[in-house]
Amino acid sequence: MTVSLVVKFAVDDAELTALHARAFGGCPTPVIPWSERLARHALTWVGAFDDTGLIGFVQVAWDGGDHAFLLDTAVDPAAQHAGTGTALVAAATHEARTAGCTWLHVDFEPHLRHFYLDRCAFRPTAAGLIRLT
């Protein structure tokens, strides 16, 4: 299976919503307005495609200056553990660096520590979080 990475691909909201539902165990409805959100808030985004369609995604949000943030990293469960997530994060890192960002931040759940710290070369930092809803 050949996987192609595409930066700032034309987003199909239903397709990306369905990918997130598969990756995170949610419901693919209602369809999330991804294309509108990305156009307004993202520095860039990267999709991973195989001959079946979209199998992976990551977006890079930013503060308009030095700081960029990885969000919404998702790989279809059928395509996991084949390097797709690592390739997506590497491409997103390259795009943020090319845009002139100095820092790339990511928050993750404990079970993803190995992926982000060991496979993607992030270093651990202290951070804080407030649940707003």
Image (cartoon, rainbow, N blue to C red):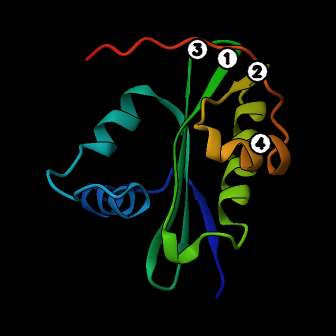
Who comes first in sequence, dot 1 or dot 4? 1
Cα separation between marks 1 and 4: 14 Å
Q: Which residue is mark 1?
A: 67
Cα separation between marks 4 and 2: 12 Å
Who comes first in sequence, dot 4 or dot 2? 4
As drawn, 71 above or below 76: above
Residues at circles 2 and 3 in contact by the CB criterion of under 8 Å = no
As drawn, 72 above or below 37: below
Who comes first in sequence, dot 4 or dot 3? 3
Q: Nearer the viewer, mark 1 or mark 3?
A: 1
At horizontal 77% and vertical 34% (from top left) the residue drawn is 98
Q: Which residue is mark 3?
A: 64
On-image quarter of the C terminus: top left
Residue type of the residue flagged with mark 3: Gly
User: On the picture, is 93 further left or further right than 118?
Assistant: left
At horizontal 50% and vertical 85% (from top left) the residue drawn is 51
Q: Nearer the viewer, mark 4 or mark 2?
A: 2
Residue type of the residue flagged with mark 2: Trp
In the picture, the disc for residue 94 is 4
Q: Which residue is mark 2?
A: 103
Mark 2 is surrounded, within 10 Å at the Cα level, by few (under 14), some (14 to 19) or many (20 or more) other residues, namely some
User: On the picture, is 92 further left or further right than 49?
Assistant: right
Residues at circles 1 and 2 in contact by the CB criterion of under 8 Å = yes
Residues at circles 1 and 4 in contact by the CB criterion of under 8 Å = no
Depth check: 74 or 50 in front? 74
Cα separation between marks 1 and 3: 7 Å
Residue type of the residue flagged with mark 4: His
Residue type of the residue flagged with mark 1: His
Mark 3 is surrounded, within 10 Å at the Cα level, by few (under 14), some (14 to 19) or many (20 or more) other residues, namely few
Depth check: 75 or 36 in front? 75
